[in-house]
Amino acid sequence: MGGDRAPAIRVRELRRTFRVAEREAGLAASVRSLVRRTHRDVEAVAGVSFDVAHGEVVGFLGANGAGKTTTLKMLSGLLHPTSGEVAVLGCTPARREREFLRQITLVMGNRNQLQWDIPAADSFEMNRAIYRIPDAEFRRNRDELVELLEIGDLVRKPVRNLSLGERMKAETAAALLHRPQVLFLDEPTIGLDVTAQKRIRAFLAEYNRRTGASILMTSHYMADVQALCSRVVVIDAGQVLYDGGLRALTTRFAAHQTITVGLPEGAVDLSGYGEVVESTPDGRTSLRVPKAQASAVAARLLAAHRVSDLTIEDPPIEDVIEQVFASRPAPTAPVTR
């Protein structure tokens, strides 16, 4: 990346506060609310800052309600920030300028953009008109996307007749017909079977390789993140808890490692070396040990037993993310007016 080149996405102290009406249950509370309403300020995004470089694929992680989708909506111009600064390809998203819209896309796994009763190919034509894509460029992009996503026979069917996996591939193609340089993906593989998930991941990796597009992606499927992202931003309660490499995340937050050892003499009690997670009759045992002690425990096992196989593994990324959430500060009380 060029040293002086501005990032594709630049976010500084981004905040979004929603004012929510609230009242107690019951008829009396309903009557009182007609005279005096009580509101609560909910800070969905609370001072988030990060950059995404050109061509970078970043995982944007957090539990439900962490502020991920609200952030993506502000980055794509669907919501105005309460405060803070955001720039995408040098544009201010909230202005919704044509040049900005031609360079970005937002794909939400639980939302439809294709027309339900007509073939996907007809919706593609509508997008061509909306984005004013020249005919030759449109045909080239469409044919390439159809080939990469393997949907040649599907685009002529009414969208309502497609399976969820088929529809998501068609939705993805429709969102990329104008060759956006920034992709905001909100759960792009949600609800898909394992095969469809793998195909979407492979497609996104190839699209990034061919076009150099920047991708900011949320997903609850850690396989998506591990397959596509070398860096992750983890947020909770609208604040960034971690921003860095995926491998460094494990190094920083994984308190334990798993040692799996195979012994040719069969099952042996190894509980003196650590917490036994699994033990099989053929002599294969998995031990959970503190990360700082893993090397020493492995050395003791090798010295004391005839070991046929031994591996040391970090915990699953899902467990590491839970450790990140456990490290978060206690939330502050909401403001009520």
Image (cartoon, rainbow, N blue to C red):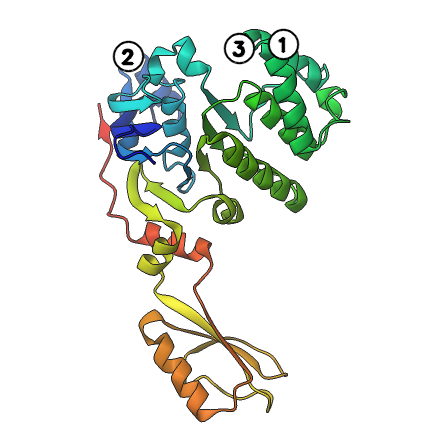
Q: Secondary structure at mark 1?
A: helix
- The image quadrant where one finds the C terminus is top left
Q: Is residue 144 left or right of residue 235?
A: right
Residue indicated by mark 3: 131
Which residue is found at the position 52% from the left and 27% from the top?
107
Of the residues shown, which amino acid type is indicated by label 2?
Val
Q: Quadrant of the N terminus?
A: top left
Give the x, y percent position of residue 188.
54, 34
Left or right, 41 with reference to 177: left
Q: Looking at the picture, tell me which residue is in the foreground, 331 or 286.
A: 286
- State the image coordinates of residue 182 (x, y, percent, origin top left): 44, 26
333 left or right of 294 in image: left
Can you tell which mark lies on residue 135? 1
Q: Quadrant of residue 69?
A: top left
Query: What is the CA distance from the residue labelled 1 to the residue labelled 2?
Result: 59 Å
**Secondary structure type for disc 2:** helix
Q: Residue at x 41, y 79 (%)?
A: 274
Relative to the observer, which residue lies in front, 181 or 165? 181
Residue at point 63%, 83% (across, down): 282
CA gap, disc 2 to disc 3? 48 Å
Disc 1 marks a residue whose amino acid type is: Asp
In this figure, which residue is indicated by the disc labeled 2? 35
How far across and down, in percent of the image, does residue 228 sit?
Answer: 49, 43
Identify the mark nearer the N-term, 2 or 3: 2
Q: Which of pointers 2 and 3 indicates the residue nearer the eye? A: 3
| Residue 110 sits above or below residue 63 on the image | above
Nearer the N terminus, badge 1 or badge 2?
2
In the displayed structure, 139 sits above or below 327; it is above
